[in-house]
Image: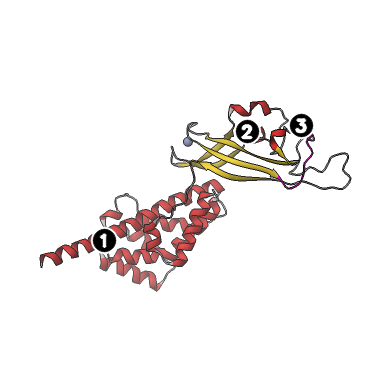
Amino acid sequence: MKSKNFVVPPDFIGQTFEYKCQKEDAYRTFEIELEPSYEPYFGYDIKIPDDFIIDEKLNHTFKAICKCKSCKEYHIEFFLHVFSNMPIPRTLIQGPVSLGFGNNKTEKTEKKATIFIEKVGANPEIKIIPNKAITNYFDRETNIWYFKGINALDKNFGIGAFAYFRRIIEKELIHIIENIKLLPDSHTAEIQKLLDKHNENPKVSTIYENIFEHLPNSLKVLGDNPIKLLYNQTSNGLHSLTEKDCLEKAEKILKLLEFVVKKINEEKSEIKDLKETIKGLK
Ligand SMILES: [Zn+2]
């Protein structure tokens, strides 16, 4: 039977988690493997090898190779530090045990050592790089949600990331439409009519649907209505979604949001350029 302890590297083999496969550009299930050099430690379950103990405490760092189960090619490497806060008995008790060793026969007082696992490094290095186009576009409050959202995404907290991105859309979508309205290629008067209607009764959501034909071409290239897609993300309940669903949705919202903001910025700078050119002609 498989031990439930996560003490030595072989204990981690076969553990799975959700992570982003860069090859497939999607969230997939990853499974932990070890390098062949750990083979001597297989079947350790009688005694913890000395290699993993410092000053009687469990203390070691090892490399976990985490492979995408879908394409079986993309993988990342984590360095995991496993340690205990107190000395632990070398001889392990059989069977699954929670994170703690108090059943040593000679010990009367139940002093349990707790085992901790922390990620100390990753390869390729995971970096959260905020998108400047986004941070320049939104105000401070929204940027705080944005930072929290991308941080949650980086740590694979799908529900957390999704919740923050939803909040951004709820607050910003009408502002985004107001900005789009001012772009040269937009049907300004038509969008204003939709906005007026919306302001009369904000609960009616027809603006998101009806704005499509009035968008500048650069925002129509998807074939789909990006504004409506963003709005739809806020109208479904969170409760029915799994962590994995949320991860995927959060990823998509972020991409879509970046696309819309980028297009708005591009069109705006185009007017600026044009104005400069005209100035030069005068
Ligand atoms: Zn993959």
Q: Horizontal and vertical percent for residue 179?
A: 32, 65
Q: Residues within 10 Å of mark 2 (few under 14, many from 20)?
A: some
Amino acid on which the number 3 mark rests in the picture: Lys
User: Could you tell me residue 138's position as x and y percent?
Assistant: 40, 64
Secondary structure of residue under mark 1? helix
Q: Which residues are magenta?
A: 84-94
Rounded to the nearest whole Å, what is the CA distance between mark 3 and mark 1? 67 Å
Which residue reaches farthest front? 55
- Across and down, in percent, residue 26 comes to 46, 42
Position of 124 with respect to 209 (left or right) is right
Task: Check disc 1 and give the amino acid type.
Answer: Ser
- Residue pointed to by mark 2: 13
Residue at point 33% right, 56% down? 262
Q: Quadrant of residue 279?
A: bottom left
Q: Which residue is mark 3?
A: 47
Indicate which disc, 3 or 2, sits on the residue closer to the N terminus. Answer: 2
Look at 13% across and 65% down and name the residue there: 280
Residue placed under numbered mark 1 in the picture = 269
Residue 92 belongs to the span the image colors magenta = yes
Q: Main secondary structure of the magenta part?
A: loop
